[in-house]
Image (spheres, rainbow, N blue to C red):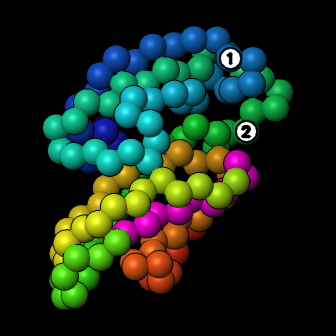
Amino acid sequence: KRLIQNLGLSLGDVRQEPSPSALAGVVLRQVPPSGSKVVAGDTVSFVVSLGAGAAATAKEGVLAPFRYVLPKAGGARMVRIVVENEAGRKDIFRQERQAGEEVRLLVSLVGETAVQVYLDDELVEERVIK
C-alpha cells in the first residue's frame, strides 16, 4: 500500500484467491498489468495468493517501482524498456517521449530481474533488481 501511495497511485480492490504455485501474499494479477503506463492518481487493483506451492519462490510476483527520466536535451525519443529474468525477456514499454519526461512503471520481479532502457534502439541504462 505504501509503495502504491509513494508512486502517487490509488489502491483499488485487493482480492485473495488460492494458488497451488504461489506463496501466500504474492501478487498473481494486477490491473493495469505490470509494465503498463500509469500516471499519478491512477487506481491499481491486485489479486493476491492465499496459499503456498512448492514450486514458488519468494520473489515471484513482487512489484518494484521503476523510474527513468529522459535527458533534458535532444527532443523526442523512442523509449523502449525491456525486462529480462527467469520468466524470459519481454518489452514492457515502447513509446515516444519528450526530452525531460519521466517514465514510471511497476515491474514484476521473478528472481533476479534486469531492466534495460533503450533510447532510439540504443541501450542507455541497465539496472539489476534482486
Whether residue 6 can be seen here? no
- For the C terminus, the quadrant is bottom right
Tell me where residue 12 sits by quadrant.
Answer: top left
Whether residue 50 can be seen here? yes
Residue at x 52%, y 22% (from the top left corner): 48
Q: CA distance from mark 2 to mark 1?
A: 13 Å
Residue at x 25%, y 82% (from the top left corner): 71
Q: Position of residue 102 (x, y in %)?
A: 24, 65
> In the rendered structure, which segment of residues is drawn in magenta?
79-87
Q: Position of residue 122 (x, y in %)?
A: 47, 83
Q: Position of residue 66 (x, y in %)?
A: 40, 58
The foreground one among 92 and 111 is 92
Up-down relation of residue 105 to residue 103 (above or below): above
The foreground one among 103 and 110 is 103
Task: Tell me the chief SS of the magenta region.
Answer: strand
Instruction: For marks 2 and 1, give the one nearer the viewer.
Output: 1
Residue at the spot of label 2:
57
Tell me where residue 28 sits by quadrant.
Answer: top right
Q: 29 left or right of 66?
A: right
Q: 17 left or right of 10?
A: right
The crowd level at tag 1 (other Cα within 10 Å; few <14, some 14-19, many 20+) is some
Residue at the spot of label 1:
19
At label 1, which amino acid type do we have?
Ser
Q: Position of residue 17 (x, y in %)?
A: 57, 11
